[in-house]
């Protein structure tokens, strides 16, 4: 039997698709087949309608969020990892939505530029090689690449699976001391990780390697980016990488609809660790599972 929550989620997807369709109709695509005078006469009206439609979708998503979540993140801690250039307002809004879903944000970790800068690869490789030798054999595979390795070590710091509390503490201190990440002063382990992409741009190979390692050590990883990132930026590139089958991607993080979608994806990642959602997501606007 299809649940009431399933119906509501479907409606959110419909409203999001409607908002996108109207936006395209009032934007560049509206120029096709029109002369300049007709376009000039209708542009303002279409823009106003677009704003009303998008606003309605935002209000609907915000109001429907508690019903959609149904407390599915209750008793599930979540770590947030931000990449360079992440918008602070988006991060705060996503954290608030996690709490609405019953989850707890254990801490927000900030990746520093040195973690993902191509010119700092030697530092990342050296530190990663040193840290893996401090762990039991096999915790980090010996043949891991530079960024896969550091991603696994970062994942162990966040999620803490397969390592002791002392080892987690040591990893956090080392990563922070090398200025690769800024870690919260005190954060419990969290098997779910929400990664918020920034606007600075990261080499696709570096981002893919980092997230491959992170996904190997966490129960579920959701990567959220803004609409532009999903259309032609970091998120778009990530979706064509093999790691996309091991995590969930969501675009539109600057909007209420995208934020709700990201948290629904987090809840879904407890059982399903893949998917592409949002305005340009190949699996639809909103995860229905």
Image (cartoon, rainbow, N blue to C red):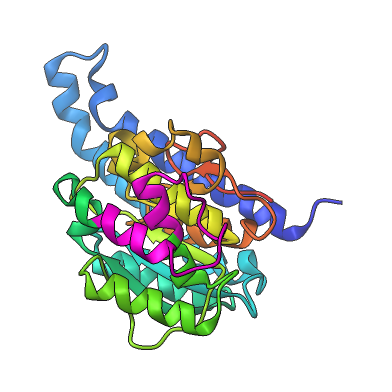
* 172 shown above or below 124: below
Residue 5 as seen in the image, left or right of residue 172: right
- Please say if 133 is above or below 277: below
Q: Is residue 17 left or right of residue 24?
A: right
Q: Does the segment drawn in magenta span residue 186?
A: no
Percent coordinates x, y for residue 248 in the rendering: 52, 48
Q: Is residue 149 magenta?
A: yes
Picture quadrant of residue 29: top left
Q: Judge from the rendering whether residue 68 lies leftward or rightward of residue 282; answer left or right.
A: right
Q: Which residues are magenta?
A: 124-152
Residue 235 figure quarter: top left
Nearest the eye: 271 or 91: 271
Nearer to us in this view, 242 or 268: 242
Q: Position of residue 88 (x, y in %)?
A: 25, 69
Q: Quadrant of residue 245?
A: top right
Q: Is residue 59 visible?
A: no
Q: Nearer the viewer, residue 184 or 160?
A: 160
Q: Position of residue 269 (x, y in %)?
A: 61, 56
Q: Residue furthest bottom?
A: 186
Observer able to see residue 68? yes
Q: Residue at x 52, y 83 (%)?
A: 165
**Does residue 261 lie above or below 44 as drawn?**
below
Residue at left 35%, top 51%? 52
The residue furthest right is: 1
The residue depicted at 65 percent of the width and 74 percent of the height is 71
Q: Is residue 53 above or below residue 166?
A: above
Specify whether 29 is left or right of 251. left
Where is residue 188 drawn, in percent x and y?
Answer: 49, 83
Name the residue: 48% across, 84% down: 166
């Amino acid at each position: 039997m299809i649940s009431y929550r399933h119906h509501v989620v479907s409606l959110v997807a419909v409203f999001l698709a409607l908002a996108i369709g109207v936006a395209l109709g009032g934007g560049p695509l509206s120029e096709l087949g029109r002369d300049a005078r007709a376009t000039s006469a209708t542009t303002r009206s279409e823009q106003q309608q677009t704003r009303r439609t998008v606003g309605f979708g935002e209000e609907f998503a915000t109001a429907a969020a508690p019903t959609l979540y149904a407390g599915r993140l209750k008793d599930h801690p979540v770590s947030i990892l931000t990449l360079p250039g992440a918008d602070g307002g988006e991060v705060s809004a996503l954290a608030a939505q996690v709490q609405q879903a019953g989850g707890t944000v254990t801490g927000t970790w900030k990746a520093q530029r040195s973690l993902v800068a191509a010119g700092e690869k030697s530092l990342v490789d050296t530190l990663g090689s040193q840290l893996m030798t401090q762990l039991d054999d096999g915790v980090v595979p010996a043949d891991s690449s530079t960024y896969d390795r550091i991603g696994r070590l970062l994942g162990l710091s966040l999620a803490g699976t397969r390592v002791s509390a002392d080892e987690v503490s040591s990893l956090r201190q080392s990563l922070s001391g090398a200025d690769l990440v800024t870690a919260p002063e005190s954060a419990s382990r969290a098997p779910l990780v929400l990664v918020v992409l920034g606007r600075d741009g990261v080499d696709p190979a570096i981002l893919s390697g980092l997230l491959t390692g992170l996904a190997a050590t966490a129960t579920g990883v959701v990567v959220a980016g803004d609409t532009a990132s999903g259309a032609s930026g970091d998120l778009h590139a990530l979706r064509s990488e093999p790691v996309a089958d091991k995590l969930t991607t969501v675009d539109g993080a600057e909007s209420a609809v995208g934020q709700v979608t990201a948290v629904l994806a987090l809840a879904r990642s407890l059982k399903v660790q893949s998917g592409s959602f949002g305005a340009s997501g190949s699996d639809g606007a909103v995860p229905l599972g």
